[in-house]
Image (cartoon, grey):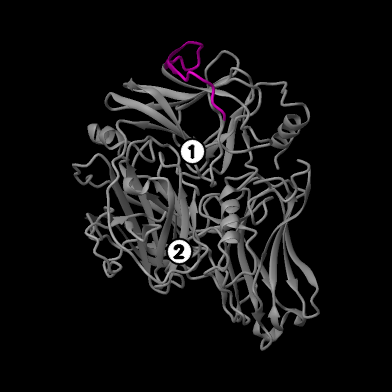
Amino acid sequence: MSIFVKSFILLFFFFGKILVYAQEGVFPIRFNSTLQNFYIQATNTGPTGILRSNDTLTLPFVDDFSYSGFIPNPHLWADRHVFRNNDMAIRPPGQGFVTFDGLDSTGRPYDNSSLSASGRADFLTTLPIRLGSFTVADSLVLTFAYQPAGWSESPEPTDSLILEFQSSSGAWNRVWYANGSSALPFRYAIIGLNDPQYLYDGMRMRWVNYGSLTGLVDCWHLDYVFLNSSRTISDTLFNDIALVQTNATYLRPYRSMPLNQFLQDTSRFLNPTHGVSVVNNGGSVSYDRSYRVFSPSSSVPLVTSSPLPSLTLGTLGSTGLIFQRFAVPTSSADSLTLRIEYAVQAVGDNLTRNDTLMESVKLWNEFAYDDGTAETGYGINVIAGSCANKFWLSRPDTLRGVWIYFTQAAANASNELFVLKVWSQIQEGGRSATEIFRSSIPYRPRYGDSIGQFQYFAINPPLVVQDSFYIGWQQETSGLINIGLDRNDTLVRYNRWFNTQGIWEESSIAGSWMIRPVMGGPFRYPTYNQPLKNAVHSEWLVIPNPVNSSIPVISIRGFGQLKYAQVHNVTGELMAHYRLGVSQDDQPIPSQATTIFESLLESDGSYQIEIPLKATKPGVYFFLLQEVDGSFHRCKFLIQ
């Protein structure tokens, strides 16, 4: 944990939230509510749908964590303390990695009794591996990629990430370690298994981090674990080319925005180019690249990129795949979702599952700078201090409310107070501001049921705005009110302002505040279809649960990849039918449905689903889920 953050939290905790200096700051998240909710539901639903192997694993042992869900693959790993995600590391070598921090497998601090508590935190342990038939002469070598901090909070020099091997006698021996530091690029560690005490059937390896036990702090990220024979100690190459992160979003400066605002001035809000980053984890390779654009209601591409000449990427090289922007498909609806599917192809690629990357472009009814995941939190620490997020319009519109994502820092701030405010003008760098809305009563921060759960606050009555406006809050109490900070996008500037000493200052902390104003009229939710059979309990979760009937947007999370989902009421009536993924070879689950709606796999491994209006009456409902392997799972949720 950084000295600044740690000192701030200790002052915050021991001196009754009275702070000497008014300032902005980045503050670590203390709870991962995604894992909390996962743990509670898994406990309550009994047997799970995930089975671990009862036998030892054979070589090669490979995991690049490029799959959905937020726990490591249980067919390779014996525990689930770490957090599998796609957002918290900087320029990873592949899609997905696991994060070590100070939170346990239930998403809670390992030690909540003291903010200075530290020690052994997360573990990641392999299932037993069959090495008894190998000798030292077989040259077994383990490699893995690791990074301190990333976009998350940095481990101190006294913190560490270590690797232990279990010997044939059962003892765990440390064979490698790295000390904490600020964010660095991913590095590869190389360990030769040249000691006979590790060459037995049932051998296990485990990574563990030493650091703070108090939250999402002192973070490390692990990727590309690869153990095999006939390797050398200088062998860091693995023939794999991977798409890893979006480097130029389709929209700019927003990640999402209302469709009517976009269509009014498309040239203003379209990036001249769009694309993703590609990483080569092996030797020099020639590759092809392409993209396709889909709408939610069809598996037929709306746009397909023209054939392009092959490119070459050098050994362990990385670059951006840049495409010229495409024309926006026409739509008569009041919202539009596009899925851009980027792909690369290379001969000799050992892992093809990370050769495709999806970006969802949402033209709904809200503005958003963030991608939906908070790597850390942002806040100020003074009574009457204000924060204002600026949004630009292409046409006059009606502001109806705002989504805000609050993170819990040193203490629960749900008893703190703030006033929601809107300004038509702020003297940036000066003192004046024109306030056009102030909530009639102060609000308290509300925490959602997942690591990326927003809370909605209405603007009542709705407010007409034009050109640009600022929305944010003024603090009524001295406690820290911490909102989510998306640190993946650091390019947007001049949109985040705070005032703690009478002057409106631009935030010096890079990232996007997780504040999303809602514009225009309310969504119209479609209606749908009919049932499935043979459901089993699983580790797929509905988040949040219960669901607020006035905000019927949920997330489905778990391990694996889903194909279809259906919503049923307690009488068995089919309320909704969703296609979860696009494949021209797939056929719908047998039903009498005339309309199938699609949900996209998000970057955090979840499926975002809007519950139709007919299924928002208070009561108990069921999701029936089908995975790509054909297995079925059932999840219960409550509308209230």
Residue plotted at (66% across, 45% down): 154
**Does label 1 or label 2 sit earlier along the sequence?**
1
Q: Is 233 situated left or right of 237 in this image?
A: right
Real-space Cα separation, disc 1 to disc 2, in angstroms: 40 Å
Does the image show residue 185?
no
Question: Could you tell whether 637 is left or right of 98 in the image?
Answer: left
x, y percentage for residue 28?
64, 40
Question: At which x and y percent is residue 34?
Answer: 56, 51
Is 434 included in the stretch rendered in magenta? yes
> Camera-side residue: 98 or 429?
98
Height in image: 34 above or below 52?
A: above
Farthest-out residue, top: 432
**Callout 1 touching callout 2 (CB < 8 Å):** no
The N terminus - image quarter: top right
Check disc 2: other Cα within 10 Å, few if <14, some if 14-19, many if 20+. many
Where does label 1 land, which residue?
490
Rendering quarter of residue 411: top right
Secondary structure of the residue carrying numbered label 1: loop
Q: Amino acid at mark 2?
A: Arg
Residue indicated by mark 2: 634
Q: How many marks?
A: 2
Q: Which residues are magenta?
A: 425-444
What secondary structure do most residues of the magenta stretch adopt?
A: loop
Residue at the farthest bottom position: 133
Whether residue 160 appears in this view of the structure is yes
- In percent of width and height, residue 635 lies at 47, 60
Q: Is residue 430 above or below residue 554?
A: above
- The secondary element bearing badge 2 is classed as strand
As drawn, the label of residue 139 is none
